[in-house]
Amino acid sequence: MKIVWSHRNTNCSLCKENIDKKIQRLDDTVRKGDKIRRLHYHPDCYVKHIRDWVEKHPYQRVTSNGGRPSLGLSVDESRQRQRLLANLNSLMAYYFPKNAPPLLNIQGDISSLTADDLKKFQNFTKRRERIVKSLEPLGGLPESHGGKPEATRRRIEHTSFVS
Ligand SMILES: [Zn+2]
């Protein structure tokens, strides 16, 4: 997947409308057997496509674990972890709502923040850090929130030998 400037008229593979020249376009290729299909998208269409997918496929904890490495948590720890993750998600949803401009614009330089924004930013950071810290002994921050891949977060289980 790459972003290019459109130099010719093409059709968006999602909305089927024309992608005009001189606007950004997302290009992708899909291999089907030995045929390569080229796909083009309006960036906005692709973003919508991802959002629609997420809406149709809400995150679900796989009880059977689907072959993914287990975090090795007890039922209680696992419950605690889920609660913390729910808190983290609502914190993120509050500061970075999906269908509205973010409460915080942290793309820019922190020094350019107003006093009010700085307060919001510190509040957000403090709350996020508290959750991150509590998550540390419980499998750590998930990859989707910027944590390390799950396999490396796996808690080492100590087998106790009873003699
Ligand atoms: Zn489109």
Image (tube, rainbow, N blue to C red):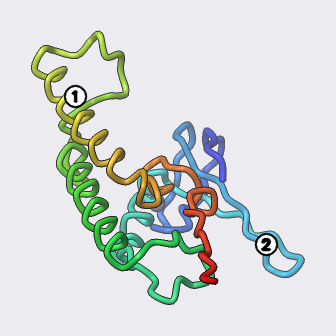
Point 46% across, 83% down: residue: 62
Instruction: Name the residue type under label 2.
Output: Arg
Residue 55, above or below 123 = below
* Residue under numbered circle 2: 31
Q: Indicate the secondary structure of the residue bearing disc 1.
A: helix
Residue 11, above or below 123 = below
Q: Position of residue 16 (x, y in %)?
A: 50, 68
Q: Position of residue 119 (x, y in %)?
A: 14, 23
Outermost residue on the right side: it is 34
Instruction: Name the residue type under label 1.
Output: Phe
- What is the crowding at mark 2: few (fewer than 14 residues within 10 Å), some, or many (at least 20)? few
Foreground disc of the pair 1, 2: 1
Outermost residue on the front side: it is 163
Point 61% across, 58% down: residue: 40
* Residue under numbered circle 1: 121
Point 27% across, 30% down: residue: 105
- The quadrant of the image that shows the C terminus is bottom right
